[in-house]
Image (cartoon, helix red, strand yellow):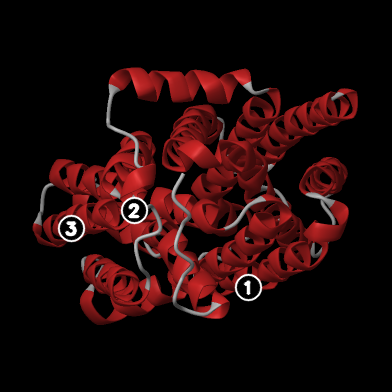
Amino acid sequence: MTPTPRPTIGRVEFIALMGMMFATIAFSIDAMLPALPQIADELTGGDAAQAALILTVFLMGMGLGTFFTGPLSDALGRKPVVYGGAALYIVSAAVGWYEDSFAMVLAARFFQGLGAAGPRVVALAIIRDLYAGRGMARIMSIVMMIFTLVPSVAPAIGALIMGLTGWRGIFGAFVVFSVISVGWLGLRLPETLPHANRRPLRLRLMRDAVVEMFRHPTVRLSIIVQTLIMAMLFSTLMLIQPIYTDVYGRGASFPFWFGLVALISGLASLTNALVVVRLGMRRLVTWALGTQIAFACVMLVMTRLNLSGEFYIFLIWQLSLFCTASFSVGNLNAIAMDPMGHIAGMAASVIGAFSTLAAAAIASPVALFYDGTALSLMIAVILFVSGGYALMLWMGRIENRD
């Protein structure tokens, strides 16, 4: 294989750029959260459940797009796929801003998710092009810290834009965000996949790559665990605003509290980056999931006691959920990508597509059981995290055996 050219930009700028590309997803989801009640009033006759489809269809489009962008980036190079995805994302955002039909807005969000898959998948492949092992895990941890900082400000930005232009103005912010991130990539980062290392876009090669990934026990387990963690996050995102509004009467201050929790949880990603080289990826994920099982069970018991100050107890638990993700998602990506450097784009696609689509399918029923309390979310978290913890213990036994 031809050696991959080293980036001509410094490591700090490289991490910031990758973080912004990853953050396309977070910004596209979290900036829409405060707009859901207004969208429901204007387009769905006040049906909040239908308005929440604004998030669901975006995730569906992203999950579908994720499967194709990796193989395309292996065949064509990393940067052309980012440019194509960004163009689709921007055009779809413009359609979402212009259309008055809820069905057309949903269609625009689906194609916006399809386009957003480009920066997300290719960023992961670029990191694997340039780094490996625990060094890659450290880079991923810092990138994930930036990724988690975006939700700390995205709802507030969305609320501010709504106050000035209405909810449609948020689509304009999506366009600006994408133009900045893709322009930065184009101007500052060289192509990281040399022509000699590219793989033709052939169905047989794609099939062989998928089979290779799922035959590798560590890769297979890490993808399944990441799916469960993503299901936990999606369930939280779908139910968090109704819980703030219906259970605790904090709907008006939701952007502030959500942002504060997301901001503090960024410290977990920083901590992970500092200790992952010494402690290892699998160990940190296992510890994070085991700790969350205890947190969720305690939360379940405490909410049954109707204690005063329950909102602040819930706030601490919400913080623990985000911290669990901070200690898990980046490390699980690194575990799965490390043996797959020769098919980094395809591997990034399979990991992203499977974890996103499966997690969305698993998490969607959780919203159906929402009964005006946080009970359905707590039970879902316990189930998802317990399953992930058991699989991480299994992964440890496989590593010890090998």
The answer to whether 167 is drawn above or below residue 397 in the figure is below
Picture residue at 39% right of the left edge, 61% below the top: 24
- State left or right for residue 358 relative to residue 138: left
Measured in 3D between alpha carbons, the distance from the residue under mark 3 to the one under mark 1, in whole angstroms, is 30 Å
Q: Position of residue 146 (x, y in %)?
A: 56, 69
In this view of the protein, which residue sits in the foreground, 253 or 92? 92
The answer to whether 221 is drawn above or below residue 335 in the figure is above
Does dot 2 land on a helix, a strand or a loop? helix
Does dot 3 land on a helix, a strand or a loop? helix
Picture residue at 19% right of the left edge, 61% below the top: 90
Quarter assignment of residue 224: top right
Does dot 1 land on a helix, a strand or a loop? helix
- Mark 3 surroundings: few (<14), some (14-19) or many (≥20) residues within 10 A: some
- State left or right for residue 333 relative to residue 8: right
**Which tag is nearer the camera, tag 3 or tag 2?**
2
Report the label total.
3
Q: Amino acid at mark 1?
A: Leu
Mark number, residue 114: none
Q: Amino acid at mark 2?
A: Arg
Does the residue at mark 2 contact the one at mark 1 (Cβ under 8 Å)? no
Measured in 3D between alpha carbons, the distance from the residue under mark 2 to the one under mark 1, in whole angstroms, is 30 Å
**Which tag is nearer the camera, tag 2 or tag 1?**
2
Q: Position of residue 400 (x, y in %)?
A: 90, 29
Mark number, residue 87: 3
Picture residue at 37% right of the left edge, 59% below the top: 28
Picture residue at 49% right of the left edge, 52% below the top: 124
Mark number, residue 78: 2
**Which tag is nearer the camera, tag 3 or tag 1?**
3
- Mark 2 surroundings: few (<14), some (14-19) or many (≥20) residues within 10 A: many
